[in-house]
Image: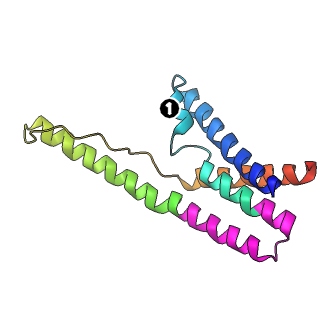
Amino acid sequence: MYQILITSLVAGIIAQLSKAFFKSAKTKLDWRFFSSYSGMPSSHAAFVSALAMIVGLTEKFSSPVFAVSLVFGLLVIRDALGARRYLGQHGEIINSLVRDLNKDKMLDETYPRLLENIGHTPAQIIAGLVLGIIISLASYLIF
């Protein structure tokens, strides 16, 4: 049980840390990068792919626990790729509208800036999936 928990957590943490370093290659390192929602690789995909893979390896791929892990992973990845990307696009449009209304002096109060980058691209998802699978295989072979 601990191998499943630790492997999944390690995959998610490594993905999140590497995401911060990918972002810092473009700009100065910022501590907010360590808790960002989007970016390369997807920590969501790394976490759930590591979970499903290590469950499949330790409990067998024909087990009901693997099936549950796989369905859970597909739901998380679908959300990261679909719904959260749409939320980011909506945030971008709303921020633009608020900016325009502020310029025209149409708003009496200030509105918080919405997050625009909270989803993942397919490449970010694939990178997270590969990372999670590699970490699971390494964990299985080592322990």
Find numbered disc 1 in the image and state the secondary structure of the residue it sits on: helix
Give percent across and percent down for residue 111: 22, 41
Given the image, on which type of amino acid does mark 1 rest? Arg
The prevailing secondary structure element of the residues shown in magenta is helix
Residue at image location 85% in from the left, 50% down from the top:
139
Tell me the quadrant of the picture where the N terminus can be found. bottom right
Residue at image location 64% in from the left, 71% down from the top:
71
Find residue 90 and report its image quarter: bottom left
Magenta span has 68?
Answer: yes
Find residue 45 and report its image quarter: bottom right
Give percent across and percent down for residue 126: 65, 55
Residue at image location 57% in from the left, 62% down from the top:
76
Could you say which is closer to the camera, residue 117 or residue 35? 35
User: Which residues fall within the magenta stretch?
Assistant: 53-78
Is the residue marked by circle 1 packed among few (<14), some (14-19), or many (20+) residues within 10 Å?
Answer: few
**On the image, numbered disc 1 is attached to which residue?**
32
Magenta span has 70?
Answer: yes
Check the image and report above or below for 112 versus 68: above
Q: Is residue 11 left or right of residue 43?
A: right
- List the single residue furthest toward the front: 1
Give percent across and percent down for residue 37: 50, 45
Give percent across and percent down for residue 118: 45, 48
Residue at image location 85% in from the left, 71% down from the top:
60
Could you say which is closer to the camera, residue 2 or residue 55? 2
Residue 42 in view, yes or no: no
- List the single residue furthest toward the right: 142
